[in-house]
């Protein structure tokens, strides 16, 4: 059975868009996450097509750059305070679960 990185790269792309969809980050973060995620997915496909240590190293380096750039952009592109201040149904449910524990 051959293990390929595409499902993980695709999952990472989808999860990286969640901060914008939940109101924690702004449009600049969304665009950056989308572009970086598609590029990272491209590196994942490159590893699946041509298996070599050089391509795998490029994927590793891309993951380091991806994470660093995404976190910096997230730090500077926070959502407006009103979006964070309003509790969402998800926040209310998670707070209730934490209080039970």
Image: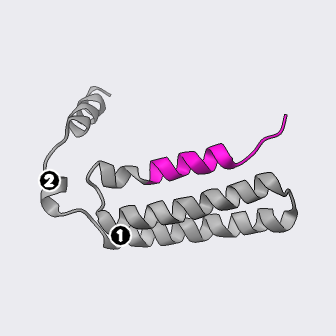
Q: Quadrant of residue 77?
A: bottom left
**Picture coordinates of residue 93 (x, y %)?**
25, 31
Q: Quadrant of residue 71?
A: bottom left
**Picture coordinates of residue 47 (x, y %)?**
77, 57
Farthest residue toward the top?
100
The stretch in magenta equals: 1-16
Give the vertical position of 56 relative to 49 (above or below): below
Residue plotted at (64% across, 43% down)? 7
Q: Of the residues under marks 1 and 2, which one precedes in the sequence? A: 1
Give the vertical position of 87 relative to 92 (above or below): below
Q: Quadrant of residue 81?
A: bottom left
Residue 53's mark? Answer: none
**Picture coordinates of residue 52 (x, y %)?**
87, 61
Query: Disc 1 and disc 2: Cα gap in Å?
Result: 17 Å
Q: At numbered mark 1, what does the secondary structure look like: helix, strand or loop? A: helix
Residue for badge 1: 75
Residue plotted at (68% across, 70% down)? 61
Check if residue 9 falls in the magenta segment: yes
Specify the quadrant that holds the C terminus.
top left
Farthest residue toward the right?
52
Chief secondary structure of the magenta portion: helix
Horizontal side, residue 26 vs residue 63: left or right: left
Residue for badge 2: 85
């Amino acid at each position: 059975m051959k293990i390929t990185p595409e499902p993980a790269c695709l999952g990472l792309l989808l999860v990286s868009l969640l901060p914008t969809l939940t109101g924690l980050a702004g449009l600049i973060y969304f665009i950056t996450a989308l572009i970086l995620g598609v590029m990272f997915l491209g590196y994942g496909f490159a590893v699946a097509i041509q298996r070599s240590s050089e391509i795998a190293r490029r994927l590793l380096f891309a993951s380091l750059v991806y994470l660093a750039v995404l976190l910096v952009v997230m730090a500077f592109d926070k959502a407006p305070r009103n979006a964070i201040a309003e509790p969402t149904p998800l926040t209310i449910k998670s707070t209730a679960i934490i209080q039970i524990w």
